Image: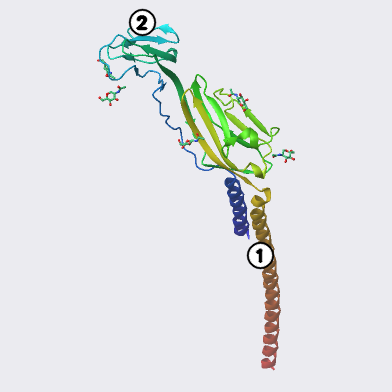
Amino acid sequence: MKILSVFIFSCIVGICLGAGASISTGGSSSGGSVTETEKTRLLKRGHPLSLTCSPNITHATTLWEKDGKEIIESERIKLFSNTTLYIVSAEEGDIGEYTCRHTNLLETKTFVVVEFSLQKHLPKSTTVLENDKLSLTCQVDGNPHPIVQWLKDGEPVQESVNSSRLTLSENEAGISNGSLLINPVMKSDSGNYLCLITQSTIQFNTTTDVRVKDIYAALWPFLGIVAEVIVLCIIIYIHERRRIKKNFDASDIDKISEQKVKEENKENEVRQRK
Ligand SMILES: *[C@@H]1O[C@H](CO)[C@@H](O)[C@H](O)[C@H]1NC(C)=O
Ligand SMILES: *[C@@H]1O[C@H](CO)[C@@H](O)[C@H](O)[C@H]1NC(C)=O
Ligand SMILES: *[C@@H]1O[C@H](CO)[C@@H](O)[C@H](O)[C@H]1NC(C)=O
Ligand SMILES: *[C@@H]1O[C@H](CO)[C@@H](O)[C@H](O)[C@H]1NC(C)=O
Ligand SMILES: *[C@@H]1O[C@H](CO)[C@@H](O)[C@H](O)[C@H]1NC(C)=O
């Protein structure tokens, strides 16, 4: 009986854990690499950074400006005659807008140097219970701050979710609109949620499929299993009681018959003596 109750207890615990695990997020992948464009370049601190004004020109005097101020060649910043600006080891102060000009170039060219990182993609899928809350965070950071927008099935989330239930706030890195909260969640909130990140001319996104589960849909299988366990317990209990009672009765009958045999033997002895 003791072993049985331990077994049933562990079953119940297992079921609880199983039910808990089903209400969670799907597989997630770690940070993604963002490809730079010709005009928007990513700065990596401590790494070299080079900008080339006109790739096919080998001999020209190039005038470089950063945020409107002329760049003077130094130990850290080299200006080559092939119109390349080379920063030996980039630092935060190198973030900004660069323009270049030389005699063979009709218009100035512009480069934007930014910092940008996406620490983690959204999980592939997110399951949430109806009336519970949905919380999604775009773990993005950048300098200058990137613009974050949330789309639900391709439309701005503000248009499909009631404004009183929707809250957009800063993420941990302080990026505006980086975190989305819907509370309480309705069935109609199911869909594809996309975090669209814009950093200068780079656009990047991460997306998750949100499923809103009926609160009873999660509860019914659990209640079914609980009912099953209770019925099983009752059956075992009744069975055990019957068995114990039967054994008791049987041993009583044995004692009585033993006594009878003894008495009969005595009688026989007495008869034989006579
Ligand atoms: C540079 O030269 C290559 C061939 O050497 C050519 O394909 C390319 O278009 C040129 N680029 C520019 C900006 O002139
Ligand atoms: C420009 O010249 C420098 C120094 O000679 C060289 O390291 C670099 O690769 C050149 N860049 C291009 C785009 O040719
Ligand atoms: C917005 O919320 C109200 C009440 O909370 C509800 O009646 C209405 O259907 C909701 N509209 C949409 C588009 O979800
Ligand atoms: C955040 O989102 C709101 C609503 O769409 C928008 O009005 C606001 O400009 C956004 N903030 C930033 C910094 O992008
Ligand atoms: C999101 O990124 C994917 C892959 O880079 C791209 O195909 C898709 O067009 C992007 N979606 C939006 C809305 O920018």
Return the residue at label 1.
236
In this view of the protein, can residue 122 be seen by the observer?
A: no
Residue 183 x, y percent position in the rendering: 68, 36
**Considering only vertical position in the picture, is 251 above or below 109?**
below
Identify the disc placed on residue 72: 2
Nearer-the-camera pick, 231 or 63: 63
Q: What element carries label 1?
A: helix
The amino acid type of the residue labelled 1 equals: Ile
Q: Which of marks 1 and 2 is nearer the N terminus?
A: 2
Distance from disc 1 to disc 2, alpha carbons, whole Å, reads 90 Å
In the shown orientation, is residue 67 left or right of residue 87?
Answer: right
Identity of the residue furthest to the bottom in this view: 274
Q: Where is residue 174 in the image (x, y as percent from the top left)?
A: 56, 22
Residue 232 sits above or below residue 118 on the image: below
Nearest the viewer among 73 and 274 is: 73
- Label 2 secondary element: loop
